[in-house]
Image (spheres, grey):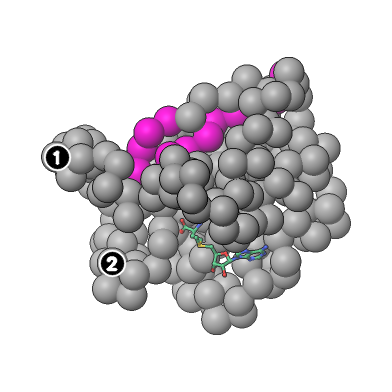
Amino acid sequence: MPEKLISRQVQDYLETLVPARPAEMQAMESYAKEERFPIIGPVAGYLCYQLARMIDARSVFELGSGFGYSTAWFAQAVKENGGGTVHHVVWDEELTQKAQHHIAALGYKEVVQYHISEAIQKLKEVPGPFDMIFNDIDKHAYPDSLSVIKSKLRPGGVLIVDNMFWGGSIFDKLDQSPDTNGIREFTRQITGDPDWVVTFVPIRDGLAIAYKK
Ligand SMILES: C[S@@+](CC[C@H](N)C(=O)[O-])C[C@H]1O[C@@H](n2cnc3c(N)ncnc32)[C@H](O)[C@@H]1O
């Protein structure tokens, strides 16, 4: 889907610039490809890791963690920052089990906490504030997530949101599906709120990188 927007040449080039990943991460990337499971991939993952290192993130909350690929990038950063907690949240128990296996194999067990739950509800429950929040849940739920995220992110914290281009669907006026409209509405909300400094980065399917003033 993202190939439609960003040329294969650019995507392949960016991927060659990401440092080699451990075998376990490579196996996760291969699994995602085979199963067509939507992960953020190495280029966006490395950017997440970089941002988490830049702000010295020790507490990260992920909404929609899948089988742990994005979690692994945040966990690496938190571990290298000196330790802390990455909250892995997904509502599929099977995915959580897979994630636990991968995260343990990568040596990040002590920095990841697992929650099998609807993600916005869990964010309301877990005490914050967080240094960094990553949002990758079902897109129709994006608008409902923003006020909760804002209340749980510390001032100076960073929000990263995936799929802001949704394979180009956001540009198609005829596409009025709940997911596409969810992304459009979320974009309107965050760009219209002066408490956020936000940039949309055309990596893979579009990332929003937002700094909370
Ligand atoms: C796009 S995948 C996650 C990929 C992961 N962030 C990565 O890059 O490795 C989203 C996952 O979150 C789950 N999910 C979607 N909406 C959710 C919600 N509101 N609460 C909890 N899990 C959700 C989906 O079932 C799916 O397993």
Disc 2 residue lies near ligand 1 with CB under 8 A: no
Residue at position x 63%, y 67% from top?
90
**Does 58 lie within the magenta span?**
no
The residue tagged with tag 1: helix, strand or loop?
Answer: helix
Which circle's residue, 2 or 1, is located before the other in the chain? 1
The spot of residue 51 in percent (x, y) is 50, 31
Q: Amino acid at mark 2?
A: Lys
Q: Amino acid at mark 1?
A: Gln
Horizontal side of 129 relative to 8 (left or right) equals right
Separation of disc 2 and disc 1 at Cα? 18 Å
Within 10 Å of disc 2 (Cα), the crowding (few <14, some 14-19, many 20+) is: few
Horizontal side of 193 relative to 92 (left or right) equals right
What is the quadrant of the C terminus in the image? top right
As rendered, which of 175 and 48 lies closer to the eye? 175
The spot of residue 185 in percent (x, y) is 66, 41
From this view, report whether residue 113 is shown above or below residue 186.
below
Q: Quadrant of residue 46?
A: top left
Q: Which residue is mark 1?
A: 9
Residue at position x 56%, y 53% from top?
176
Quadrant location of ligand 1? bottom right
Horizontal side of 25 relative to 13 (left or right) equals right
- Rendered image: mark on residue 181: none
As rendered, which of 102 and 147 lies closer to the eye? 147
> Start and end of the magenta stretch?
201-213
Q: Which residue is mark 2?
A: 33
- Of badges 2 and 1, the one in the foreground is 1
